[in-house]
Image (cartoon, grey):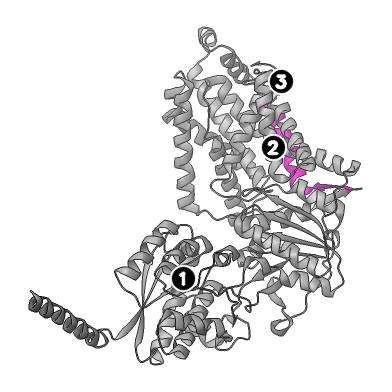
Amino acid sequence: MTTVHITGSMLLQLVVSGLLAGGLYALVALGLSLIFGVMRVINVAHGTLLMLGAYTTYWLFTLTGLNPFVSLVVSMPVLFVVGVVLQRLFVHRVVEAPELSSLLLTFGISIFIANVAMLAWSADYRSVEFLTGSFLLGPIALSKPRLVSFVVALGLTGLAFLFLHRTKTGKAIRATSQHRDVAQVCGINVRRIDLITFGLGAGLAGAGGSLVSVMFAVYPEMGQVYVFKSFLVIVLGGAGNYPGAFFGGLLLGLVEGLASLFLTAQLSEVIAYVLLVIVLLVRPTGLLGGRT
Amino acid sequence: MRTAFRSVTGLVTALVILAGSWTPALAQEWTVGASISLTGTYAKPGKYTQEGYLLCEKDINDKGGLLGRKIRFVVYDDKSDPPTAIKLYEKLITEDKVDLVMGPYSSPVTNAASTVSEKYKKLMMASLAATTSIWERGFKYLFMTISPAEVYLEGLVDLAVERGLKTVAVINEDTLFSKAAAKGTIELAKKKGMQVVFHEAYPKGTTDFSALLIKIKSLNPDVIAAGSYFDDAVATTRQMKELDVNPKMYGVTVGGDLPEFYKLLGKTAEYVYGSSQWEKGLPYPGIKEFVTNYEKMWNREPVYHSAAAYGACQVYAEAIKRAGSLDSDKLRAELLKIKMKTIFGDYQVDERGFQVAHKMVLHQWQDAKKVTVWPAAVSEGKPLYPTPPWQRR
């Protein structure tokens, strides 16, 4: 067996691949972070919402041939509505309850939705064969679907930040996340903010799903991986810290990419979690500190 | 006392003799017991297995049965669960008192069920188990039908060596079957003088193969061989294109033979090699009639599971005819000797009952069609070689 000699171009390739993956993690984690920040609700169903977004894109692409990136215009509003309905029916009951309640509730919701999806669409793997191949820049191959997804994810994350910082509703969301009671005293309708936040979080998960569908297989349990990764990102970045979620996402992508270069594929999965434990021990509030 | 004892033994003897003479008159048929996964994770291939058995039953009976009697399958659902299969074979042998047993679907279920048949010295014709370790336990009454995992990519290695290729990279999912397939490929490649430049396993459920493929790309091997299932085979192929990895040949174990592989990948699947136990276009004796009868009976096309079940049943029937008896030891002696071609291909086993003659086929996706390219004796076309780089397709 020849040993793999690590060259500069390989490193560069993995840094690029890692960052491309990280952009997506950031987008998905931002949705989760928003919900947690505002309501202290740990939304385990986030991955299931991502899966619904992916299926929306898949069906639109398969049945009508709609460009998967354009289908974001559909999947985000659809998931926003799903989020609002979930919040209105179930999640609002656990907003001020202990965190375990929200964990159990959203866990139940995710099992329910995933199984309905399995009944409706079967457990078969499907894929959106839209953009394939890559751009070659010297020794570096830039995967077309990943590059476009990365750019879109970055754009959406940017828009979400603008929304949070520039609009009245956005500011209200941040205020609620900083202090619920004070926000309420200042005349913010926290109930309404909860609805919008959950819708927004679900919308971001849906967008993540649409983007994932052009790269990886679509199936009812595809969301699980992303829930775990999003939790990791949030811990890395600091719970409720929105820019933290962004940098945490990129960092996770990078670490995963580089780890698999030096270790085997099996071991590199472990690295992300080792990182999690270290951050929890050394800097439990996350690399960028707590909520902003 | 003594007379009482005598009359009792006399009565018992009489009953035994009576019972003995009664049996043939009562039982007009031989019963063949099997558990099959009709529900659970293996339900899809399990159903095909059952259909193969039942078609075999019909064909044998239409030709007058075996040793003057018709045969009848007694099938129970093992729910894809090995412990359930153990209970069912126990019931088949001790309660239903079946005359013969045939194997269930899949390696894990066969592995479990065969412990029961071995215990009762019932000969089990295993039709759908491909894991070598099952035949390394020293069982005497267990016979194998399909090719073992280790030779799945024999064709790929063969074709590569024919074309003078030197280096191969092997990847596999870290599970029983795929590991065995990778191990077998590595041994074959080394034996034929190729150099294995890379071997790495990935955990089940991996979706991102970038790092693995980048490492392989840096070594630029002539051949990439993947011990894969369906979803990882699809993902690896897509990502090879994304990362511009260009081997001269690339083959996968499982997945590449399903029509869904091409449906999902489209043109990206062109030039990819896949392996299969059986194809309905192969020139084996009786295969056309089998396919026609199968479609008539079940309203769908047979797959290799159906053919393996039917082929195993054919071999078993042949052994019974030659032995002229259902005695396990006599059948065993015949099954160790028999060399024959069924609709599933060649049958011959070594002293362990391990299959050594059945050949896998290798096909390549050419213009949206699966074309059998190996072994030469049964191939439908020539492999398109070398695989052009992605940028020039």
User: Tag 1, which chain?
Assistant: B
Which residue is at a point 27% across and 87% down the rendered structure image? B24
Real-space Cα separation, disc 1 to disc 3, in angstroms: 58 Å
User: Tag 2, which chain?
Assistant: A
Assess whether residue A152 is covered by the magenta stretch. Answer: yes
| Rendered location of residue B381, percent (x, y) | 74, 80
Q: Residue furthest front?
A: B2
Q: Residues within 10 Å of mark 3 (few under 14, many from 20)?
A: many
Residue type at the position of mark 3: Leu
| Rendered location of residue B187, percent (x, y) | 74, 64
Assess whether residue B115 is covered by the magenta stretch. Answer: no
Mark 2 or 3: in front is 3
Tell me if residue B343 can be seen: no
How many callouts does the rendering have?
3
Q: Which residue is mark 1?
A: B103
Q: Which mark is residue A24?
A: 2
Q: Main secondary structure of the magenta part?
A: helix
Q: Which residue is mark 3?
A: A287
Real-space Cα separation, disc 1 to disc 2, in angstroms: 48 Å
Quadrant in which the C terminus of chain A appears:
top right
Secondary element at tag 3: loop
Same-chain check, marks 1 and 3: no
Secondary element at tag 1: loop
